[in-house]
Every structure is written in C-alpha cells, then in structure tokens.
Image (cartoon, grey):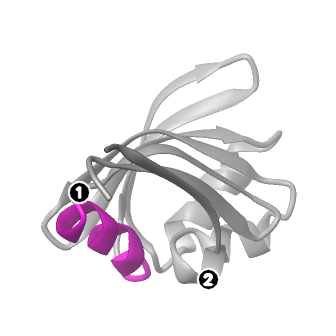
Amino acid sequence: MVTIVGGRVPTDELALNATFERLPGLEVECERVVESGTSVMPLVWVRHGDRKAVETALADDPTVEAVTLLSEFDGESLYRMEWIGHVRLLLHMLANGSATVLDARGRNGDWHLRVLYPDR
C-alpha cells in the first residue's frame, strides 16, 4: 500500500537556512528533486522581488554548492541548485526508504514536504 507523508522541517535541518534568514520574505518551491551521491540537485522556483539579492544570498549559503538560473517568468526565477551539507534527512528518505518527494516548499523558516513511499 502506498503511503504519503506530509510534514514540516525547519530550514536549519534541511537546506537554504542562511538564504531564508537573509531574505525573510523568500518563498521557494521545488519543481523536481534528484539525489546524486552525497548531494541533492533540485529545480527550484524562487519568489522574491530582488533577483540580485537572491543570487547573492544563494552564493553565500553553505548548503548550496552550485546555482544556475534557468528561466524567469512573471516575478519568479527557476534555478538548478546543488545542495550539500544539511540535506542528510532528504537523502536518507530518498535512498533508504525508496521515497519520492512529491512537494517541497520553503518559507518563513520551514520546509513543508509531501513524500510518497511505495509501501508502509
């Protein structure tokens, strides 16, 4: 039986905590999340009025190894990122539980996740 779990994880337990602290109004939504060895490479929609401030914050964030701007549309920017460091929780869910992250949204210091497990 498929199981879907929803939950909240503080940003300091996952990724982008320094970016969220620097830009309190920031909202992000993961489009796709791919696990790659010891890192996670998501496609992330970012909602914030100042793209330059976002890119500076991401460049200084210790959980971000690399960032590439892929597209901009209607006040949102789509980035490919490589997350390192505080992504152990997500890596554990993906690798050990055969889980699929259905939805990951971050804002106001928290990540909200929906994760599908193929069985209980």
* Dominant SS type (magenta): helix
Give the crowd class for mark 2: few <14, some 14-19, many >=20 residues within 10 Å: some
- Secondary element at tag 2: helix
Q: Residue furthest top?
A: 74
- Secondary element at tag 1: strand
Amino acid marked by disc 1: Glu
How far apart are the alpha carbons under marks 1 and 2?
A: 19 Å
Left or right: 99 in relation to 57: left
Q: What is the number of the mark on residue 12?
A: 2
9 is higher (above) or lower (below) than 53? below
The image quadrant where one finds the C terminus is: bottom left
| Numbered range of the magenta stretch | 85-97
The image position of residue 65, as x and y in percent, is 35, 68
Give the crowd class for mark 1: few <14, some 14-19, many >=20 residues within 10 Å: some
The image position of residue 78, as x and y in percent, is 52, 33
Amino acid marked by disc 2: Asp
> Which residue sits at x=55%, y=82%?
13
Left or right: 92 in relation to 68: left
> Which residue sits at x=35%, y=79%?
88
Left or right: 9 in relation to 102: right
Say whether disc 1 or disc 2 marks the residue closer to the N-terminus.
Answer: 2
Q: Residue furthest left?
A: 37
Q: How many labels sit on residues? A: 2
Q: Which residue position holds label 1?
A: 35
Left or right: 36 in relation to 115: left
Q: Are marks 1 and 2 in contact (CB under 8 Å)?
A: no
